Amino acid sequence: MAKKKRKLKIIPLGGLGEIGKNITVFEYGDDIVVVDCGIAFPEDDMLGIDLVIPDVSYLTKNKEKVRGIVLTHGHEDHIGALPYVLKELNVPVYGTKLTLGLLEQKLEEHGILSTVDLRTIQQSDVIELGCFKVEFIHSTHSIADSVALAIFTPVGTVVHTGDFKIDYTPIEGEPLDFARLVELGKKGVLLLMCDSTNVERPGYTMSEKTVGETLDEIFINAKSRILVATFASNVHRIQQVVNASIKFGRKIAICGRSMVNVVNVAMELGYMNVPEGLLIDIDQVHKYPPERLVIITTGSQGEPMSALTRMASGEHKKVEIVPGDLVIISANPIPGNEKLVSKVINDLFKKGAEVIYEALADIHVSGHACQEELKLIHSLIKPKFFMPVHGEYRHLKQHANLANELGMPMENIFIMDIGKVLELTDDSARINGSVTSGRVLVDGLGVGDVGNIVLRDRKHLSQDGLIVIVITIEGDTGNVIAGPDIISRGFVYVRESEDLMDEIREVCKAALQKCEDKKKNDWSTKKSIIRDALKDYLFEKTKRRPMILPIIMEV
């Protein structure tokens, strides 16, 4: 009897059909390797939620198999969930120097740095994790120290591009390691997993250097204070602002907690070159003339609590926007943040500032590859099978079509969903089964304690408000001795709706009388009858359905 072929399983637990929360599981026999472990930002309907992290219950269930977590780069959507996941799954974490430097800060904030096993790797290193070998390939992205991965498995080689673009003139270091990709392509690649973020954009992504040229043009003509908002993690962008400031004799102040943290880590590890005496404390800005100042800040996405948003609304304690200020927003709004960003731009204009954003100048370039770069990668690697990653469903679909146009048969292309299992042998691939997956919501210090029911209640409260009915009854007789008292929050203003309150009281009294007539004296029945009677009455009167909370007290 022929021996059954063992299969490589690839299981995305996040990052497909969505932007963020990237995490992929590679499993063969008794060995598991995890690539990335990021967060996503909450959607509009997730009221009060701070972060969304992937559900890793499949990994915790198989924790004895997990050999390590491998990181492609230091962006939040690739490393942000690790402080939460490592508490459940303490395995070695491998990444480049800057990636681990940024991660260390997060782990320190969570008080678990001393218990975590972080292992620094160099680009082009190869590590062994169980039956897997993982090679780190130099790549270019909007953060330094990014890598692509070649994962050598018993059934063949998988190439995972990570987030990348092809930048022939990077700010620092070499371009993407084409030679190694060509070499892998010649030896034969079983599966390519490739970044799909910009697949809808034709042509090429511009080089980061073009931003530096635009900044020089802006700085040479600026007569007042300059504020630059960008992603804290975009070290190369910050370096270019530093270079322009040196060139035009301006001091720099850093504003925003994450920006301060990243700049400190990048300078410490040698990824940023800032001359002595150039940086000043944010408290000292008033000591310098405006034309000699640059403030680098967070808030390019219009996040409600970020430094730039607070400056625009006049709530920042240390920086006030004054007429004549020049604000450069050096970032693209992430899908879903467009309204927030345009509100900030409007508020800045109202304060008299001049604002330069992407629609007006080339002050931002993407960190992701466009169509022509993706075609080049496909042509170099020539994989047998293809799985588009990192994007919403439309991005994955477009990327599948692009691979098909380049000659790959559609049956060899797999558009995956989170939790689905892709099984591969050396000559076959198919989707087979699924594992537990989804999202875990983080609210304050609570991880996973806010589920769909709580979100539904929050939504209900936000839309229709709350009515509390307080009734006091005598313990022995069950007679009502006080109330019903009505408390309304977010439904109607009590003082202006006294008639409605009186009617609500009458409805409650009638409901209590009904309970008495039917000899139904247990509290839960009474509450349920009051709730039902009020629900119908209020909808009839107001066409609203507030949350109704009857409270019965016994004396």
Image (tube, rainbow, N blue to C red):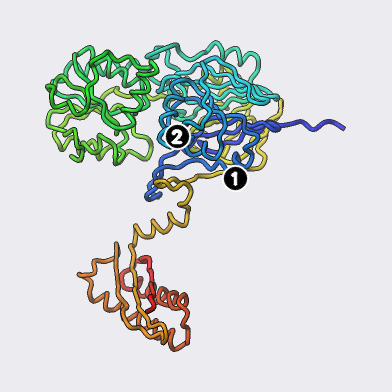
Left or right placement of residue 466 versus residue 176 in this view? left
Task: Name the front one of labels 1 and 2.
Answer: 2
Residue 30, placed above or below residue 57 = above
**Amino acid type indicated by mark 1:** Thr
**Amino acid type indicated by mark 2:** Gly
Secondary structure category for the residue under label 1: loop
Between 374 and 489, the one nearer to me in the picture: 489
- Which residue position is annotated with label 1? 436
Residue 310, placed above or below residue 159 = below
Residue 353, placed above or below residue 289 = below
Quarter of the image with the C terminus is: bottom left
- Crowd band around label 2 with a 10 angstrom C-alpha radius: few (<14), some (14–19), many (20+): many
Residue positioned 48% across, 41% down in the render: 53
Percent x, y of residue 372: 47, 20
Q: CA distance from mark 1 to mark 2?
A: 21 Å
Left or right placement of residue 428 versus residue 35 in this view? right
- Which residue position is annotated with label 2? 80
Considering only order in the chain, which callout, 2 or 1, is on the residue closer to the N terminus? 2
